[in-house]
Image (cartoon, rainbow, N blue to C red):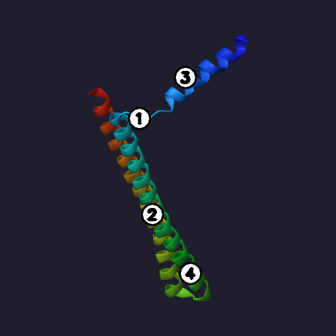
Amino acid sequence: MRLGSFGAAAAVLLLAGCGSQDPREQRIDNIEDAAEAAADNIEDAAERQTDAMAAEAEQLGNQAEALTGFDAERLKTRADALKEEAKIVARQADARARAVKDRAKAEVSTIRAE
C-alpha cells in the first residue's frame, strides 16, 4: 500500500513537470532550435557544394589521365585546386555554424541573466 502512494506521488510530480513552459524558457527553446536549424542549413549547403566540387575534381582527374603533357598537368592541377578549395569551404561552413550556435548561446545566457 505504501508503495502505491509513492507511485501516485511520483506521477503527480511528473505531470506537474510536464506543464507548459514559462515564456522565458519557451523563448530560449526557440532560439536554440532556430540556431540548430540555421547551423544545419549551413552545413548541408556546404556539403552539397563540396560534393559537387569533388565530383568535378574527379572528372578533371579522369580527363587528365586520358591526356599527356601540359594539358594533363593543367587538368590535374585544377583538380587538386578544387579538392583544396572544397576543404576550405567545409572549414568555413564549420566556422559559420559554430558562430551561429555561439551567438545563440550568448543570447540564451543574456535571457537567463535577466
Labels 4 and 2: the sequence-earlier one: 2
Left/right placement of residue 4 relative to residue 82 reads right
- The residue singled out by tag 1 in the image is 21
Labels 2 and 1: the sequence-earlier one: 1
- The residue singled out by tag 2 in the image is 46
Q: Nearer the viewer, residue 108 or 99?
A: 108
The answer to whether mark 4 and mark 1 are in CB contact below 8 A is no
With respect to residue 59, does 114 lie above or below?
above
The answer to whether mark 3 and mark 4 are in CB contact below 8 A is no
With respect to residue 98, does 110 lie above or below?
above
Q: Given this view, does label 4 or label 2 mark the residue nearer the observer?
A: 2
Cα distance in 3D space between marks 3 and 2: 45 Å
Quadrant (top left/top right/bottom left/bottom right) for the C terminus: top left
Residue type at the position of mark 1: Gln
Cα distance in 3D space between marks 3 and 1: 15 Å
- The residue singled out by tag 4 in the image is 59
Q: Given this view, does label 3 or label 4 mark the residue nearer the observer?
A: 3
Residue type at the position of mark 2: Ala
Q: Residue at x 52, y 78 (%)?
A: 56
